[in-house]
Amino acid sequence: MPTVLALDQGTTGSTAILFGDDGTIIGRAYREFAQHFPEPGWVEHDPLEIWETTLVAAREALHGEIPTAIGITNQRETVVVWDRATGTPLYRALVWQDRRTAKRCRALRDELGEAYVADRTGLVWDPYFSASKIEWLLSHVPGLRERAARGDAVFGTIDVWLIHRLTGGRAFVTDHTNASRTLLYNIHEHGWDAELLALFGVPRASLPEVRGSSEVVGYTTRELLGAEIPVAGIAGDQQAALFGQGCYRPGQAKNTYGTGAFFLMVVGDEHTLQTGTGVLATVACDATGGPTIALEGSIFIAGAAIQWLRDGLGVVTRASETEQLAKSVEDTGGVYFVPALVGLGAPHWEPEARGTIVGLTRGTTRAHLARAALEAMAYGTKDVADAMSTASGVTLSGLKVDGGAAANDWLMEFQAAALGVPVYRPDVVEITAFGAAGLAGLATGVWADAAGFCATRTYEEFSPGDARPEAYAGWRRAVDTALYWARQ
């Protein structure tokens, strides 16, 4: 039976999953690695540890099997620098969470304005993205600038690093989805942007070739996994999840409910995007793995709000209790919880906002608070969806969901009602790895087309019920309250 190995390299660990051509999981392994915090706001990883944990997980998941192809999905924006000839890292990886270049990004925003970078990359001036991290490395690693100019020292996101190691240094490539998260890639021209490279002082010779997300880019060396296996799928984690959910046409979208939430909606290349709406543009995959445009919104707090109710207030002892508590009351009794515990993300982008609970009375119970926390996830998602429709003119046709909170039936029903479109929950939780496997399988004939790949999944549908617009209006007033106090 044809099989595809998906390597899902995340922020805290490396996962390897072997999928059959019917979508079943045949093997799975996971390895954690260390996090390094040398100074406040700095977050680093050991690139060799990332590689070693990925290789160990791959071998364990395969258990001697030789897959048809390998697909890679990865934590985005994190940057590795290494010697191209020897493969030796020249510094620890600077992780997407790292904030050491925040001052530099603020200065660029004040000097050049948001439109300068948004029009080219779809992004904003923020240390979250890779460019300012590369600039910092060029300035702080002795001799690196000269070596990079010659192409002897090279930079890459985690996909580039893993492919370079897997192929014995023969392939130095990335894909459009990862390139679009660097703040150096022009998403309209589909290439590295010369003006941004000059602005950050990044030599073109030090950056990888940008390839499609579904094509053979190299072969593993035989001694690693027992054969020369084609590396044929590459996508950043959120774009891989989008493809794994079968979302590659305009209006199709997915939301991942984790600690926070990542909402992506495909809009396509032909749409003119309206800036200033609080959502980012990024490159996703079309049905062939080629580049298309998606909008992305990051909601900072989703499932973490339930964790806070559990660990901070003791309102619940287990997150799963919230479903029955929400069902036990007809509504929140006028209570709204804006979970801005670390600021507000899309579409508001207010870092100074703080968590706000309004509408408390003597009659408020823990059931009302639990329901308000769940409703906040759904309403926050609606805020992002509405902003995306405003930005693109594309109407949301439905929402695919994954992540821990997607297991809550009540929340999924409420989400469908709030959006006014059906919500679909897949039968597999490893949807990010599944997307990477799909991209690799399409390139190597495991699946004939995207429709055949997606047909291996089944979905539970939640149909929209009563929307309760007056309740959503109350949520908007609560958000305005949080924003008001943040700006005083």
Image (tube, grey):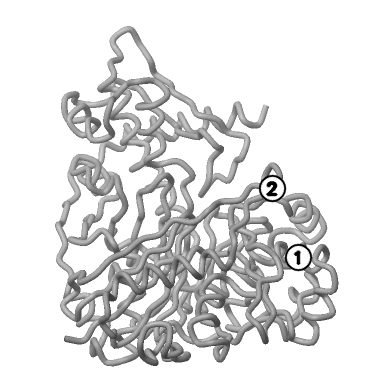
- Whole-percent x and y of residue 33? 49, 56
- Whole-percent x and y of residue 115? 69, 63
Tell me which corner region of the image, top left, top right, bottom left or bottom right, holds residue 358.
Answer: top left
Is any atom of residue 222 visible in this view?
yes
- Cα distance, mark 2 to mark 1? 15 Å
Residue ID for mark 2: 38
Q: What residue is shown at x 32% (from left), y 36% (from top)?
A: 375
| Secondary structure of residue under mark 1 | helix
Circles 2 and 1, Cβ within 8 Å, touching? The answer is no
Mark 2 Cα within 10 Å, few/some/many (few <14, many 20+)? few
Number of the front mark, 2 or 1: 2
Q: Nearer the viewer, residue 37 or 299?
A: 37
What amino acid type should be assigned to the residue bearing mark 1?
Leu
Mark 1 Cα within 10 Å, few/some/many (few <14, many 20+)? many
**Is 172 drawn above or below residue 201 in the view shown?**
below
Tell me which corner region of the image, top left, top right, bottom left or bottom right, holds residue 367.
Answer: top left
Q: Earlier in the sequence, mark 2 or mark 1?
A: 2
What amino acid type should be assigned to the residue bearing mark 2?
Pro
Quarter of the picture holding the N terminus: bottom left
Residue ID for mark 1: 137
Q: Which mark is residue 256?
A: none
Q: What residue is shown at x 46% (from left), y 30% (from top)?
A: 477
